[in-house]
Amino acid sequence: MKYLTMTKTEKFLENVASTIHERGSLWGHPFYNHKRISELWSAYLDHPITASQVAVCMALLKISRISESPKSEDSLLDAIAYLSIYKTVLEAEADINFTWGDD
């Protein structure tokens, strides 16, 4: 039997998925968390911000940090996680019947 070993990229992406799950257990489902953030940002900026826009903005924040510290594994992990969360949140925004556990 041939054993397959994970590449560094596969291990990194596995770590991204694990991080999303760990943080989700702390802060709740990404849609609800990003929706709360969008409501706060919308009130502060006096301009509507969607939950999916929050995910993109958070990814951009991490990309900005990467430009300052290109070898920052943590910022890279977080940027990829936020872009993954964007997809989840965007799908939840499109589903008017979304409830936790549907994703």
Image (spheres, helix red, strand yellow):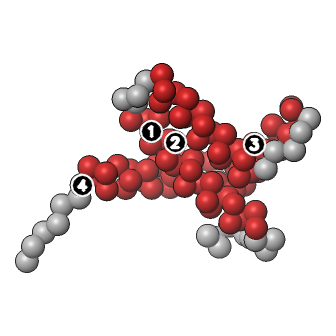
Give the residue number, with chain letter if any, for mark 3. Answer: 37
Asked if the residue at tag 2 contacts the one at tag 1, i.e. Cβ–Cβ closer than 8 Å, the answer is yes
Residue 42 horizontal/vertical position (percent) = 85, 40
Distance from disc 3 to disc 1, alpha carbons, whole Å, reads 21 Å
Residue 78 horizontal/vertical position (percent) = 50, 41
Closer to the observer: label 3 or label 1?
1
Q: Earlier in the sequence, mark 4 or mark 1?
A: 4
The answer to whether 8 is drawn above or below residue 102 in the figure is above
Q: Earlier in the sequence, mark 3 or mark 1?
A: 3
The answer to whether 60 is drawn above or below residue 29 in the figure is above
Amino acid at circle 1:
Leu
Residue 7: numbered disc: 4
Q: Residues within 10 Å of mark 3 (few under 14, many from 20)?
A: some
> Does residue 74 appear left or right of residue 49 in this picture?
left
Q: Residue furthest left?
A: 1
Give the residue number, with chain letter if any, for mark 2. Answer: 79
Residue 76: numbered disc: 1
